[in-house]
Amino acid sequence: MNFLSFLEDELRLQKPDSAAPVVVDLFAGCGGLALGFEAAGFKTIGYEMDEDACGTYSTNLHGVCHKTFLTPTSELANRADVIIGGPPCQPFSVGGLQEGMHDKRNGFPAFIGAIERYLPRVVIFENVRGMLYKNRAYLNVILDQLAAIGYRVECSVLNAVSFGVPQKRERLIVVGHLGTWEWPRVRNQIFTAGDALGDIAHTIPEGSRFLTESMDRYVAKYEKASKCVRPRDLHLEEPSRTVTCRNLNGATGDMLRILLPDGRRRRLSVREAARLQGFPDWYQFCGSESSQFNQIGNAVPPLLGKAIATQVWKHLESTEVRNVQSGRGYRRDEQIQLQYN
């Protein structure tokens, strides 16, 4: 199957039905998770502090994204059937200091505060798998808080490549629900970076930037020191490694780049980065190039979002409606498991 056709078919948007469930998207970014939910038929309302990301969300989606700094008492929508979000991952990333709950960027108090006030039928958050390590104790606190409200809580590490994204990207997904939950099934077909970029990978788009000789030397030194078995160029015959803000927008040996037939290394364009993250070509990003790269690197791949959203829809249709406060939540550490190897 052609990847771009698959992407267009999976993420085609139609105006949501007036009776569609309302999804409140916190720390919404540029709308990657919301795109997946809208493609599955939900209404979305986003909340995000970055102006460019809000513009991207509102430009491309039926839902509107409100620019706001979220706090535990932030006034949001009139109702929320589902609350989703990606509280900032920097406090928990193994690439950072992992200060967790003590990091000023920690968004979980605002996320839990919204859940306590709106009592949605389903709660979902996404974060880096680094939460399972140094900050595992804080993750357990969050899970216990959801359970205390009345949710049944399940966790899994999902790899975006298993759901049609041409990228190896493992993320922790936590679901709070009121009945039974089924994780999305993995796809049999794996798409590669070449499937995503095939028509443009070896072209030289206007404004292309190349690694300089000094940068090439730095890359060689970096890769030797880190004992890379093969250069960290983008290998088109396999899925990309994880797309991040740093390897899209930083001048380091970790950056994603394409080795051209003439031996030059070209940095990825915004559109190439977006394809690797699973955004269709019609999705337009607001702001400077640097801002666009950051929005893409921080996003939840929309195809992963849709896979989860489809399961949420099934859950809402099959689960008897009951007051969340009457339920009894539970948590089992063994539920945290790899969905894809």
Image: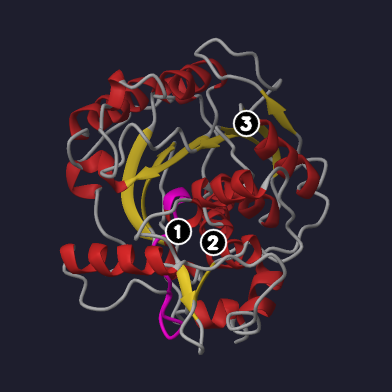
Residue lying farthest top?
73
**Based on the displayed image, in which of its 4 quarters is residue 157 positioned?**
bottom left
Q: CA distance from mark 3 to mark 1?
A: 20 Å
Q: Main secondary structure of the magenta part?
A: loop
Instruction: Give the labeled residue for mark 2.
Output: 277
Please say if the residues under marks 2 and 1 sit with CB atoms less than 8 Å apart.
Answer: yes
Instruction: Give the labeled residue for mark 1.
Output: 243
The disc labelled 2 sits on which kind of residue? Gln
Give the mark nearer the N terminus: 3 vs 2: 3
At a point 31% along the width and 27% down the height, the residue shown is 142
Badge 2 local density, few (<14 within 10 Å), some, or many (20+)?
A: many
Q: Tag 3, which secondary structure?
A: loop
Give the mark nearer the N terminus: 2 vs 1: 1
Magenta segment range?
234-246
The disc labelled 3 sits on which kind of residue? Asp
At a point 29% along the width and 44% down the height, the residue shown is 95
Instruction: Give the labeled residue for mark 3.
Output: 50
The disc labelled 1 sits on which kind of residue? Val
Q: CA distance from mark 2 to mark 1?
A: 7 Å
